[in-house]
Image (cartoon, rainbow, N blue to C red):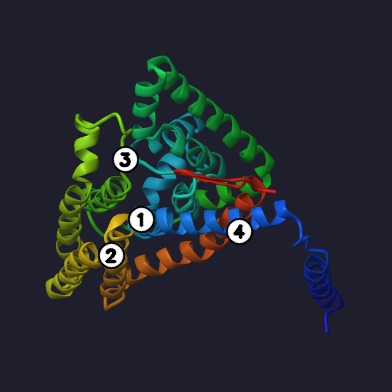
Amino acid sequence: MEAKKEFKILLWIIFFFALAFFMPIDSASFRTAVDATLDLTKWYAQEHLVLCLLPAFFIAGVIAVFVSQGAVLKYFGANAKKWLAYTVASVSGTILAVCSCTILPLFSSIHKRGAGLGPAVAFLYSGPAINILAIVLTARILGFEMGVARVIGAVTFAVVIGSIMSLIYRKEEKVKREEQMNIQLPPESRPMWQTSFHFFILVLILVFANWGKPSSDETSGLWFFIWSNKWYITSIFGLGLVYSLIKILNIKWWWVATATIATAISAILSSTYIGGSLSPLVPMLVAITGLSIITLQKDDENKEWTLATWDFAKQILPMLALGVIVAGFLLGSTHGDTNIPGI
């Protein structure tokens, strides 16, 4: 037996036993914090997991598998010009309406594809802050000056933080730079416009499926119209995904048609028998299940897409779950009309 390994196991056993032994279950604040933890975890699972994170994992899989490594290395690689890499990384989040959790699989995918740590971290930091919806809403609610300040502040701090991370891990970055000097890039399997179409169709599905409800005072206008019809708009882009799966990924049309029909039927049944905010989760889960099944068939590249998606989910979901639990326990749960204090 390895003494060091066995000692670690012993320490974990002692830790969990002590945690259970001294748990202050008679404390009102402790019980409230537990309630807040469970409430926040439930809310996060209902509001973010299916509609935000799962599509984001598939988008990350597209970057990891379909986007050419040459394109990533050209703009984000360790040997790319720093001003170009940081500029592209810090502003590219503008086209993605993602939150601070949804950006994680995208960050992981570009880093895995060869992006330098500094530009990848800059993308991770600035993405949620400068997406187009966040900028527009900030400018509308807080004023144009605050919208501009948000963009400038996010980009500036993204570059600073990315540079610091690159400096901290400069030895690892040097090794990556040397490896990328001699890398032999494989030829692109398809034209860039096809990969871009497939990528942005998934992004648009993510954006409109998560379009937030306007304020109660706003009952007309563009934002209200989009929110009122967001599932119809999402369905239109879903048909774009159907086209992409058949024409670009060359999946047999009857497989795609079967998954599409199953998704449509589940949408009708869920709106009839479930209703409310939970009804869209059912067709989204059916669509994701169908997409996973049809891409895991014969074609190796399509199969690799789904397997890469699963790899990102395995890596990121446990960390996010732990983060939500800790946040709920320490900080409480605040959403909608709910406000439960933490410890």
Residue 216 position (above or below residue 300) = above
- Alpha-carbon span between mark 1 and mark 2: 17 Å
Q: Secondary structure at mark 2?
A: loop
Most extreme residue toward the bottom is: 1
Q: Would you name the residue on which mark 4 appears?
A: 322
Give coordinates of residue 266: x percent, y percent: 22, 69
Q: Earlier in the sequence, mark 1 or mark 2?
A: 1
Q: Identify residue type, mark 1.
A: Leu
**Residue 274 bears which disc, if any?**
2
Q: Would you name the residue on which mark 1 appears?
A: 51
- Alpha-carbon span between mark 3 and mark 4: 28 Å
In the image, is 330 to the left or to the right of 74?
right
**Residue 317 bears which disc, if any?**
none
Q: Secondary structure at mark 1?
A: helix
At x 79%, y 65%, the residue is: 19
Residue 235 position (above or below residue 170) = below
Quarter of the image containing the N terminus? Answer: bottom right
**Front position in the image: 105 or 51:** 51
Q: Earlier in the sequence, mark 1 or mark 4?
A: 1
- Alpha-carbon span between mark 3 and mark 1: 15 Å
**Residue 213 bears which disc, if any?**
3
Q: Earlier in the sequence, mark 2 or mark 3?
A: 3
In the image, is 302 to the left or to the right of 141?
left
Of the two numbered discs 3 and 1 in the rendering, the one whose residue sits closer to the viewer: 3
